[in-house]
Image: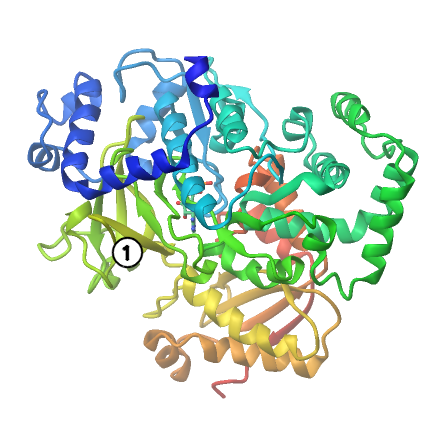
Amino acid sequence: MLEKMNKKFDPAEIIEEFEILTKDAERVQIETLQKILEENGRTEYLEKWGLNGRTDPGSFKACIPLVTHKDLEPYIQRIVAGDASPILTGRRITTISLSSGTTQGKPKFVPFNDELVDSTMQIYKTSFAFRNREFPIANGKALQFIYSSKQFKTEGGLAAGTATTNVYRSLQFKNTMKAMQTPCCSPDEVIFGPDFQQSLYCHLLSGLIYWDEIHVVSSTFAHSIVYAFRTFEQVWEELCTDIRKGVLTSRITVPSIRTAMSKLLKPNPELADTIYKKCSRLSNWYGLIPELFPNAKYIYGIMTGSMEPYLKKLRHYSGELPLLSADYGSSEGWIGANVNPKLPPEWATYAVLPNIGYFEFIPLRDNVEAQKHDEIELSMENKPVGLTEVKVGEEYEIIVTNFAGLYRYRLGDVVKVTGFHNSTPELKFVCRSNLLLTINIDKNTEKDLQLAVAVAAKLLAEEKLEVVDFTSHVDLSTDPGHYVIFWEVSGEASEELLEECCNCLDRSFVDAGYVSSRKVKAIGALELRVVQRGTFQKILDHYVGMGAAVSQFKTPRCVGPNNSSVLQILCSNVVRSYFSTAFC
Ligand code: AMP
């Protein structure tokens, strides 16, 4: 078994396997569902819905309802509490994943098992094989900004941690990274350290020590790469001092990290001087990554969806290096691999692997009203369709049935079908399906907010400023209610400029419901609140303190009244606020 996992894999073989799987995606889907239902047919959940051992798609869809996490919570809770009976899966669940929870406000518990590790490795290998064909790398190291979350035991004795942590801990992960010839340059103690700021510093230091071997700079979500190099701007001189003297800064206090890093660190004044000179030469840190790591071939991480706003900064640090978006998945399981790595992140798509789960798609056309209430009474028109029945150009909400006890589970993501790879669809991630901003008849999604901020941020760029991060809130304490947009800006912007940005934001929400409500004053003037530098760092710290992993962190793009701690962080850091005059 170990031998098999250690084996160097052949990318051509992986591509060949993928081609075979995707040529007959419909049959593979039927077989995958059959396998899932055979393994789990005797579970309390499937028996409750009267499946009676049947394994065909027709019976499955007729018996099993579409559910959200909330519906499954009572079952998951029992598993978490230690109930070992077959509740959702035939084989006992011994590990629980915590979703990042940054979109919903609190982490969700989802079952995790070996099959999810297997599918993660399949996804990693598949996209690597395609990537390596276009951007070959060999015998190098990866500077990976990856961090484990705190792991703990649930009251029932199950191991719990974020999905990425569960994956990093698996032997398979290490072996796959080795087989890809890009092991992480940092010691394990850094990845699994208890303090992510210290881990981040040591990731940077490890990268610099192995500077000429670094072939890839990566993270799970692109935010972590941007965050890392923003931090580099603050600590680069300290890093140089450590390298010059061969002594680790006293800011690293975790004994295991100190011991591990001391083994790597030797006095190297020459390297310290080179780094110092390179950094001093750079203009506003443009092209920092290739300057530090001249043998890097590309930057890799999830760059779509809520990561898109960081692309501009990432491009700034990356100079001419290509940005390759990583794959599409969630704590609940993986969905698709990026098999067209040459496409820029804005165009990245994900080809669904038909053997890692059973996938259905709810057509979203004409369904906006239902979406608004998040309670879909499925009409004939928007009944879920199968993986191979989706249509190019259409948007869908994705439904997952996996090997870890989720059946017809609404993931809450909206995707658009852009084409097919053989007979499996290629999906573009659109946004989370829940509406972010709505007061009256207005409906604005995460994507709408992202677009509005991108337009308004262009005005800031004229003064060489940028939006470091942003979020939103619906303020109903005023009558009428109004949208509040929080911005952290990279420097001092003039009053006039921010007033202009505020008006621009208001005008950039082009949804007809919003515009008409604004005109008749059923929605009040949009408010732009500028927060102090470091506010979004405090939000990140807050989530990390609650057990979230930096690796999976996504800034919440809307902060609801239930998320009072984050709202409190935002409101107590406001330095200036503006009301739009756009509809006066
Ligand atoms: P988590 O809750 O941490 O497991 O995050 C999973 C969610 O992250 C997914 O449901 C998506 O909303 C988002 N996500 C994952 N992969 C991608 C991707 N490639 N592009 C955009 N969003 C993604």
Q: Is residue 468 above or below residue 90?
A: below
- Name the image quarter holding residue 500: bottom right
According to the picture, the residue beneath numbered tag 1 turns out to be 373
Q: Is residue 18 above or below residue 497?
A: above
Q: x, y percentage for residue 88?
A: 27, 22
Q: x, y percentage for residue 309?
A: 54, 61
Q: x, y percentage for residue 297?
A: 59, 49
Q: Is residue 153 above or below residue 313?
A: above
Q: Is residue 112 above or below residue 139?
A: above
Q: Amino acid at mark 1?
A: His
Residue at the spot x=45%, y=29% of the render?
Answer: 97
* Nearest to the observer: residue 298 or residue 416: 298
Residue at the spot x=45%, y=14% of the render?
Answer: 3
Residue at the spot x=61%, y=79% of the render?
Answer: 459
Q: Secondary structure at mark 1?
A: helix
Residue found at the far bottom of this picture: 584
